[in-house]
Image: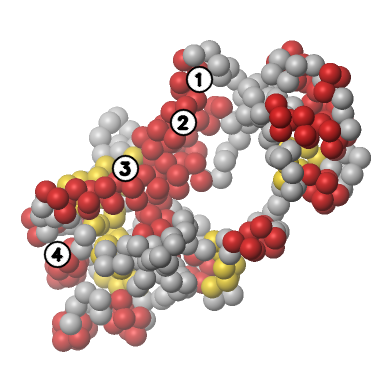
Amino acid sequence: MTGPLAGLKIVELAGIGPGPMCAMLLADLGATVIRVARKHPVKLGIERPLKYDTLLRNRGTVALDLKDPAAVETVLELVEQADALIEGFRPGVTERLGLGPEVCLSRNPRLAYGRLTGWGQHGPLSQVAGHDINYLALTGILDAIGREGQPPTMPLNLVGDYAGGSLYMTVGLLAAVLEARASGRGQVVDAAIVDGAAHLATTFFGMVAGGIWRVGRGTNASDGGSHFYDCYECADGRWIAVGPIEEKFFLQLLERLAIAPESLGPQLSRDHWKAAKAVLAATFRTRSRDEWTELLERTDACATPVLSFAEAPHHPHLRARGTFVEIDGIVQAAPAPRFSRSVPAMPTPPQPATPENTDRALSAWFAPTKIATLRRAGLID
């Protein structure tokens, strides 16, 4: 492996969503990650062929029956060599499997034991099921997203699962690994999506407290309530996003739209927002999205086309940066962020747990004789 995390070893107990995203990010940056999957899989999340489950890229998989004590012992032998472990089960599940923090830390006192859940390891809801929409609902974030007078809008599962969960788990694990290198002692990292999502919203809680942010969807400067931070439909039915919050940028937008600033009233006066939005909406409906893009995109008017997933990889800026790559015929995001010296390698596609791939995955952890012993015992295929 190459990249800034080369040499870091991670055990991932297979789950869905946030856990795999965290493991992918670490692997993308060079960590050696082994995914411990169920030998007899059950349906989890949205099923799809392995090729299209892109969160599983860049790491090997070993399929084990964790109801077998010998398989649990095999995982613990992996843990002995690991810097960190990622699990995303309900509290108490890994303890019942014999892979809880106490057992793992007894085998590897320097381990960063990552527990990634929606509700966290304690609290009244810690044992109940939930998904991204539920975690955002409880933190106040979901209530703030959407149009005035309309129901809350789900921001995919990016804000909760992946930002509030995966990214906070990644930061937490790396912090715990660094601390363990200084102290010699591992610890449990309790990454709850509700905690991470709430933390993401820190600035908004401050603005609410200061009376700057109104409680109510679509009534504020940056939630679609203002005319200078919104999406407008164009003549061809496609959309353009504008966000010139600063006055000097807003004036550039108006100049290119041939709208006199004084006709809209003061930019930050809420009393003028709806009327000003109607003027901009009528203006944008006079040309196609691509015509507006040609006129506005390479200026400080803060205007960009609203692209689909299919269109985004072809945008000249994203092509120039290599933001997207094609792996095994699937277009997907390249590793991020970028590094000037320790550049990560191109990710590898998700791998099925065939005997050949299992051997390859375990070779970074066990000697060939050990792998052969596991196969003779029937623990691996």
Residue 80, numbered label: 4
For label 2, the SS is: loop
Location of mark 2 (residue): 201
Counting residues from the N terminus, which is met first, the one under dot 1 or under dot 3?
3
Counting residues from the N terminus, which is met first, the one under dot 4 or under dot 2?
4
Q: Residue visible at 49% across and 65% down?
A: 53
Counting residues from the N terminus, which is met first, the one under dot 4 or under dot 1?
4
Q: Is residue 375 left or right of residue 262?
A: left
Between the C-alphas of marks 4 and 2, the distance is 37 Å
Q: Is residue 317 left or right of residue 32?
A: right
| Camera sees residue 357 | yes
Q: Position of residue 156 (x, y in %)?
A: 56, 45
Q: Are marks 1 and 3 in contact (CB under 8 Å)?
A: no
**Which marked residue is nearer to the observer: mark 4 or mark 1?**
1
152 lies above or below 172: above
Counting residues from the N terminus, which is met first, the one under dot 2 or under dot 1?
2
Quadrant (top left/top right/bottom left/bottom right) for the N terminus: bottom left
Q: Nearer the viewer, residue 124 or 352?
A: 352
Mark 1 residue type? Met
User: Toward which corner of the image does residue 319 lie, by quadrant?
Assistant: bottom right
| Camera sees residue 118 | no
Counting residues from the N terminus, which is met first, the one under dot 4 or under dot 3?
4
Location of mark 1 (residue): 207
Q: Are marks 4 and 2 in contact (CB under 8 Å)?
A: no
For label 1, the SS is: helix
129 lies above or below 221: below
For label 4, the SS is: helix
Residue 191, numbered label: 3
Q: Nearer the viewer, residue 319 or 16?
A: 319
